[in-house]
Image (cartoon, rainbow, N blue to C red):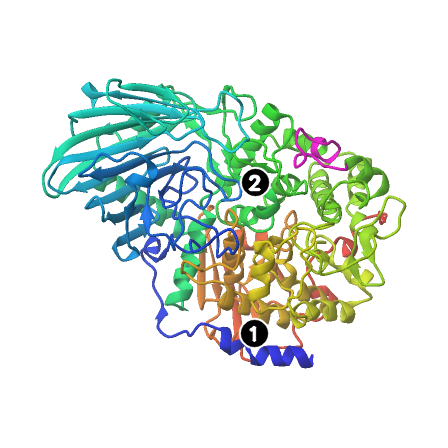
Amino acid sequence: MKNFGLLVTGLIYFTASIGQLVNNVSDPVEWVNPLMGTDSKPSLSNGNTYPAIAMPWGMNFWVPQTNVMGNGWVYQYSADKIRGFKQTHQPSPWMNDYGQFSIMPVTNHLKFRQEDRASWFSHKAEVAKPYYYSVYLADADVIAEITPTERAAQFRFTFPASDSSFIIVDAFDKGSYIKIVPAENKILGYTTRNSRGVPENFRNYFVIYLSKPFTIAYTWHDSTLVKDSLEMQAGHSGAIVGFTTSKNEKVTLKVASSFISLEQAELNLKRELTDESFEVTKQKAKETWNKNLSRLSVEGGSVEQTRTFYSCLYRALQFPQRHYEIDANGKVIHYSPYTGNVVPGYLYAGTGFWDTFRALYPFLNLVYPSINKEMQEGLINAYKEGGFLPEWSSPGYRSVMVGNNSASIVADAYIKGLRGYDINTLYQALLNGANNEGPVTAVGRAGVKFYNTLGYVPYDVKINENAARTLEYAYDDFSIYQLAKALNRPKEEIDLYARRSQNYRNLFDPETKLMRGKNQDGTFQKPFNPFKWGDAFTEGNSWHYSWSVFHDVQGLIGLMGGKEMFVRMLDSIFIMPPVFDESYYRGVIHEIREMQIMNMGQYAHGNQPIQHMIYLYNYAGQPWKTQYWTRRVMDQLYRPTPDGYCGDEDNGQTSAWYLFSAMGFYPVCPSTDQYVLGTPLFKKITVTLENGKKFIINSTNNSDQNFYIRSAQLNGQNYDKNWINHFDIQKGGSIDFKMSSSPNKERGISGDAFPFSFSSDKSVKPRPF
């Protein structure tokens, strides 16, 4: 407690000054900074984001490309040159991209190679918004502008007076095709460039229409200009069209693409752009963003807090992307990255469930459930086409990360009330994934035979990250158990997954009070260094992963020796120095470096495994420590700036943590209907629910100093729980917090105030462990 007091004293150093308060956000998209998190590099991530010029969950994004073709860090804030404007589907620089091509204006001299055509630019002459991007390309003396639709976009280039103005289309390497049709002011083609996760026939088809006839038309391949052919198929192909321009002449391009065919790309363009002007498309895109962002309205925060909130909300509405299109008959169809066929139905792509099961998908279930309903229908199609649910899709199966967390994605949606799709097929998909190894290591469950017989994945059977797999499988089994109960499955089936949900106990080491790798013979792995990253764990160490018992915190408290010891273990995270053992990786990975420099001890918020840990004080009767640490993380580790995150943003997960925490609660255990309380950031947040009702979070005396909850009322009635129910929020109403500068150590301290834990669930009879 002494150490905790010292930490509280230090809070004011880290909190943002409130200054001018923002009491009315009428145009939320204008508070978004798409450059938040873009000042990143492989050795240190401040978000690893790029400015996505896109629609919410759009099929295609556009991004200014500062790096060379194939570099996952497509846009780096520290860069000073732009090589083109790229269509992208990249969910993460570590996953890289697929379905990509670029467009670039040049003047004076014909320059088509990516290094030659690159132009100097400055952020001082750059405007980045979700619905619009503009930049001055100094070498070309051209202002480039972009505005998007879901599957198309408009470009507007303002040229100087020149008899040598050109537009370069780069279809990228690894196999591409391009054709120029001068009679229609048109360029068409396809790119095959990808980063795995696709069949052999994968193509991204595109069509481009120019508003101005061109007098020059060349193709090129690799580094060779071809003046006598309007069509090119090569490893790396591209097109050049040229014309004379007058000063400030604007040339508009309408661009659309399709994973299905050139004809579908034409249809996408016709349907989404028709004859509308650049300004009309821009206004429509802005209205769509504002409609979606306005579902959450914040009041009474600082300018910086408001900008951070809406910038995080922008990130949370990007992935996964729509991977489906609408055919000529108005039917939903998609190209399957699992079979290579074009088939009916929805499909989404570009997310890793290891990251996003924690907060991003629960956030969708709370605020945007109809979108997640489409995503669930897409998962049904993925299962039918590929035989397993994806754990990382980009766009098809990608063999990265651990766990079988599709179980959480499916169960949480149904438990939170989503209906109108084939949940029974999804349940069968969960059983299949839980009992089989998949076509790649990260699909299904690696080590499933060991797990299902021994109750853990052993350390010494050459299955990497085995302890992490065991802990996540146990939680995933809890998710299956929850869904099995909801679907009235046979009792023996329900009991089986209830028992397996307790497998986390098999890795608990009573000597260190931490999770530890275990050998096949039942002995713990030796030597054991709890600060060793990787090895038995995934992008973290035992201090990070030992809390991954989302569904049974009371069970973990019991193993650790009771609430007092549990709290001491939690406190230790912040008291210990940020020491580490990187020997498994043979070098310091960026996640380690990000923990080391954040000055929060062993707490590594820049990666996902520990992000829920702060909320666990609520389970042990000291909720004020959750309130302290959630406010500190929000104030210290998030900024609406290019270095605004403290690690990888990861498809909306780290943003969703902030969004939930700013509302004052967090889904520690998805697949239940509870959110665990933290502390609200704003004086008022209004959540406009899809059912038309509003839920209002009030904390009128909230401030830098008043971040502790003194008392709470739910719909006018005193509320002493450390959690709030999803369905109470869905009914509409309000929760009113009275805040204080000192902790209330009498509120939320009794067992009946604690959130759900499996071990405390009296409905579980008989106890399965």
1 vs 2, front mark: 1
Query: Is 26 rendered above or below residue 351?
Result: below
The disc at residue 546 is none
Q: Is residue 568 left or right of residue 179?
A: right
Label 1 packing within 10 angstroms: few (<14), some (14-19), many (20+)? many
Residue occupying image coordinates x 52% and y 53%? 656
Q: Is residue 295 magenta?
A: no
Question: Residue 308: image x %, image y %?
Answer: 42, 60
Label disc, if present, on residue 418 of the rendered structure: 2
Query: Who's the residue at 72% across and 46% down the image?
Result: 465
Q: Nearer the viewer, residue 365 or 389?
A: 389
> Which stretch did the figure color magenta?
432-447
Q: Does residue 439 show up magenta in the picture? A: yes
Give the left or right position of residue 244, taking residue 556 as reference: left
Helix, strand or loop: magenta stretch: loop
Residue 460 shown left or right of residue 193 in the figure: right
Q: Nearer the viewer, residue 90 or 411?
A: 90
Element assignment for label 2 = loop
Residue carrying label 1: 708
Q: Position of residue 114 (x, y in %)?
A: 34, 38
Residue 86, position as x, y percentages in the image: 36, 38
Identity of the amino acid at label 1?
A: Tyr
Q: Is residue 682 visible?
A: yes
